[in-house]
Amino acid sequence: MSALQKLKEKYIWISYFSSAFELLQWDMETHMPKKGGKWRAQIIGSLSEFIQIQQTSDEMGKLLNEAEKEAESEEDKALVRVAKKEYEKFKKIPPELWGKFALETAKAQRIWEDAKRNSDFSIFAPQLEKVVELVKELSEKVGYEENRYDALLDFFEPGLTVKDLDKIIPKLRKFLIGVLEKIERADKPKDVFLGKFDIQKQKELSKRVLEIIGYDFDAGRIDVSAHPFTITISHGDVRVTTRYDERDLKYSFFSTVHEGGHALYEQGIPERFRGLPIGDGASMGVHESQSRFWENIVARSKHFWEFFKPILAEYFEDFKDVPVDDLWRSSNIVERSLIRTESDEVTYNLHIMLRYEIEKALVNDEMSVKDIPSVWNDKMKEYIGVTPKSDSEGALQDVHWAHGSFGYFPSYMMGNLYAAQLLYSMKKDLSFEENIRSGDFKALLDWLREKIHIHGKIFEPKDLMKRATGEDFSTEYFMNYIKEKYSEVYRINL
Ligand code: ZN
């Protein structure tokens, strides 16, 4: 057997353990009784360590080097390139450092929960300081060219650098703050999705909308969890979760479509890539572009509501008399809000910029942990125009820092930007609006499959976007999208 073949078999074998890991994780978030948590955390920790050891074994290193000489097809070359990059990166991190990182972030999560409950950042600060130190150490071990933060970005968005972000952000921020000011002077639409909505019916509606956008229920399922997520157990088993709020129909509806977008991506990655390092999405940002595409660009469009209103009325008949315009405008209410996960398309990226600037400063020793709340509040005031009254609705709202996931936030922004660029490119090939109005979501999905999904992780995001759209990445598309859409929603001139 060739080294390349052996390498593939080894990766597939390791992925069996990853699948078990994911399934346990899924169960923990959806069905596990509370008292099962302690033992489960041990299993998950051990499995994760086992997988890590397998992936970074010397045998893997040898196989990778031999396979590199044998790889001929583009696919095999990409497989070895992606695998080798990961292998070398993780090899540079000493196991003790990984262990310490896992331990301190697990602790940090518990302390963060406590701090958030008490709305007191000072409870979290000492542990977060430890996490930041470890994150800095990790970046140093992994290495970077210009900025320590680049090493972290590369975990989530390969190829993206501080230089790129610092070029994108100032212009985008100015634009968004301007849009926000103009929208504020316009009439605010009333929210027709508030009221009382039977949970069982919401569940049926969630299933229906997933089916409509092309989610394969023979290869997945939907359940309830505290925080919605998508998880891939195997090629034929990609699951999503959501959360229901009896008083607000928007929440479950759009979060279901969002996770559906992630799941469509996963279901569209070719089966022959599965278990291999190229069998994932291209990056967190590209993944987010898919979820945002379906959630914001499709499901929050006017044409979508033209199509979907009669279906919605099958579940909640009061909507029969609600004009399409009201459904559409209610889906796109812009507000100066404190919480990132509840924010709209206009303010969302501003929330991300604030976090990015704080992370970058922390990692580069330009700011200390104890100053986070005051910097946070100042930036909130400056960018979004509101000031948190407490740490729990300010600097303690996200779990990412407790997880040690520094460098993750920019992926959310990149996802929004990629999604808009994909839209304009798709519009050249399809009758986008007509497709949506007539419920032909397959046309959209087929396009995304061909341009994005079938490539798995073969290309880095910049390269993938260029191949998909024929152009270099640009933020202009997102700004145009916001201008066009919100001029119409708010009946103003942006
Ligand atoms: Zn997402």
Image (spheres, grey):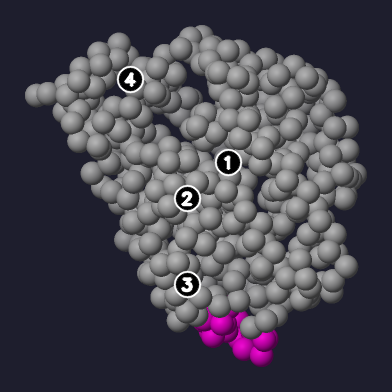
The CA distance from mark 3 to mark 4 is 46 Å
Chain-order first, disc 1 or disc 2: 1
Q: Amino acid at mark 1?
A: Ser
Q: Amino acid at mark 3?
A: Phe
- Occupied quadrant, residue 128: top right
Q: Amino acid at mark 4?
A: Gln
Q: Which residues are magenta?
A: 305-323
Q: Residue at x 24, y 37 (%)?
A: 74
Reading the image, the residue beneath label 1 is: 411
Disc 1 secondary structure class: helix
Do the residues under discs 1 and 4 have CB atoms within 8 angstroms? no
Disc 2 secondary structure class: loop
Q: Position of residue 244 (x, y in %)?
A: 62, 62
Given the current orientation, which residue lies at the most extreme bottom position? Answer: 321
Q: Nearer the viewer, mark 3 or mark 4?
A: 3
The relative height of residue 163 versus residue 321 in the rendered view (above or below) is: above
Q: Position of residue 134 (x, y in %)?
A: 63, 15
What's the magenta bit mostly, secondary-structure-wise? helix
Reading the image, the residue beneath label 3 is: 432
Left or right: where 392 falls relative to 90: right
Q: Nearer the viewer, mark 1 or mark 2?
A: 2
